[in-house]
Image (cartoon, grey):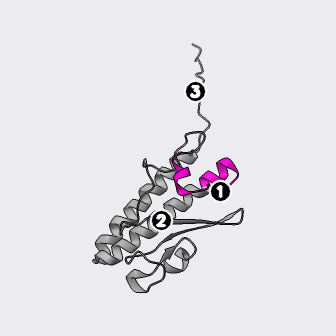
Amino acid sequence: MQCKKRHVRRGDGGFTLVELMVVIAIIAVLATIVGVNVMGGLDEGDQVAAKAQIRSLKDAVVMYRTRYKRLPDSLDALINNPKGIKFLDSDEVPLDPWGGTYQYEVEGSSKFVITSYGADGMPGGSGYDADLSSDNLKQDS
């Protein structure tokens, strides 16, 4: 009796960029939820949520730059771009936890900054009114 060998076709394996971004988004949402519950304060929870959103926006801008070899002109380009690719999970750019818009500035050809003006909605401030920026996330974490 002769055994027949089956040829199993396997995929290429690995994860796609979209799958990785979904995992990162889920981790950011979970970090925000845990942050709100553990911190016990709404102000601190809002700051944690803003930092998570800024990280998510920063990742989306990096993905855009990788795809198009340039930085987007605005955060809206992460949703509305020439090829119709969405780099964010939502249909619009999120507002910060205090209802303000995130500020996006391009500095040169490869550097950018995403900023939330904090609870007071104005540049500067201290404590819960302090600005949160993609430049200073690492030192605040």
Q: CA distance from mark 3 to mark 2?
A: 49 Å
Q: Nearer the viewer, residue 131 or 56?
A: 131
94 versus 68 height, above or below: below
Q: Relative to 38, is 116 on the left or the right?
A: right
Q: Which residue is mark 3?
A: 8
Can you name the residue that lies furthest to the top here? 1
**Rendering coords of residue 8 (x, y %):** 58, 27
Magenta span of residues? 63-80
* Front: mark 3 or 2: 2
Image coordinates for residue 74, horizontal then vertical, percent? 57, 57
Q: Earlier in the sequence, mark 2 or mark 1?
A: 1
Q: Residue furthest front?
A: 122
Q: Is residue 75 in the magenta section?
A: yes
Disc with the residue nearer the chain's start (3 vs 1) = 3
Q: Mark 1 highlights which residue?
A: 71
At mark 2, the secondary structure is loop
